[in-house]
Image (cartoon, helix red, strand yellow):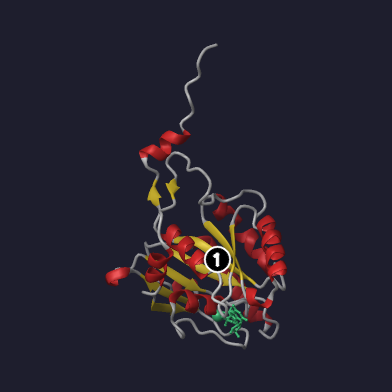
Amino acid sequence: MTNQPSPSPSQPTLPGEQAPSTVTPVVALGWLHTAKFLTTAPQLHFLPPLDVPEIAFVGRSNAGKSTCINTLTQQKQLAFASKKPGRTQHINLFALGKQGVTDAVLADLPGYGYAAVPKQDKIRWQQVMANYLVTRENLKAIVLMCDPRHGLTELDEVLLDVVRPRVEEGLKFLVILTKADKLTRAEQTKALSIMKLQAGGGEVRLFSATKRQGIEEVATLLWQWAHPVQATASDRATITPEPRVAD
Ligand SMILES: Nc1nc2c(ncn2[C@@H]2O[C@H](COP(=O)(O)OP(=O)(O)OP(=O)(O)O)[C@@H](O)[C@H]2O)c(=O)[nH]1
Ligand SMILES: [Mg+2]
């Protein structure tokens, strides 16, 4: 993720590009709380094609993906979390939207890097995931869950290589530093600045399900990504170059 930074909400919007919408954390969380189980699939071709934005949670086994989804959606058992690594073994989709109208989907993906998984299963799963990340048409954003005590693993780096071309084309990217409650304040600050360098323009946030840290920030970002608005005429006007005046 070091080559091409993805646009962040603080950057100016280019002509024709979608500007981030504004939203309060209360609205963003209210939207996430509407989450409902949609479907589960062992392989990509079992997933229904969808035309709403999909936000995928990926990362090594036990990083806290399912817990993060449960925390954001305020539902204890929506995604199955467990102390035992390898709990999530399918791609699970959760529908979001007010008044029963689905306007986005969260995808909980199985973790990788769990040593006890047989080699054949590991290879099969890596292929399913790479396929998903490269070809899922409505994939709008990737949330990479990373335990800052371990940093980016070799498989995280492989994943970054797989998604880099799509990020360069505008796919949103967020690294969540999970289990921040296990770090001191100073360690959190250090982990955040190291990851900001490694994420090369992607967003980075500290998060703790147990301490309820980072929930509003992450919720707001996901809402914005799922509800982009076209750049307004005034946005475009602000970046239109001044006509050159002959000297
Ligand atoms: N202290 C602490 N523990 C957490 C946090 N988030 C998750 N955990 C714990 O980490 C373990 C793994 O959490 P999961 O959410 O199942 O992890 P996962 O990434 O979905 O794992 P797989 O499904 O195996 O890929 C569980 O014991 C959780 O309780 C957190 O913010 N703080
Ligand atoms: Mg899981």
Q: Amino acid at mark 1?
A: Val
Residue 36 at x, y percent in the picture: 37, 78
Residue at figure coordinates x 38%, y 65% from the top left: 27
Quadrant in the rendering for residue 233 = top left
Q: Nearer the viewer, residue 4 or 43?
A: 4
Residue farthest toward the left in the current orientation of the protein: 99
Depicted 243 relative to depicted 188: above or below = above
Residue 156 at x, y percent in the picture: 66, 67
Depicted 169 relative to depicted 129: above or below = above
Residue farthest toward the front in the current orientation of the protein: 185
Residue 153 in sight from this viewpoint = no
Regarding mark 1 in the picture, which secondary structure is present there? strand
Depicted 134 relative to depicted 81: above or below = above
Residue at figure coordinates x 65%, y 53% from the top left: 200
Residue 161 in sight from this viewpoint = yes
Q: For mark 1, does the 10 Å Cα neighbourhood hold few (<14), some (14 to 19), or many (20 or more) residues?
A: many
Depicted 23 relative to depicted 34: above or below = above
Point out the image quarter for the C terminus. top right
Residue 180 at x, y percent in the picture: 64, 73
Residue at figure coordinates x 38%, y 72% from the top left: 95
Can you identify the residue that label 1 sits on? Answer: 143
Residue at figure coordinates x 68%, y 80% from the top left: 119
- Image quarter for ligand 1 equals bottom right
Quadrant in the rendering for residue 83 = bottom right
10 displayed left or right of 30: right
Q: Nearer the viewer, residue 107 or 27?
A: 27
Quadrant in the rendering for residue 178 = bottom right
Q: Nearer the viewer, residue 14 or 178?
A: 178
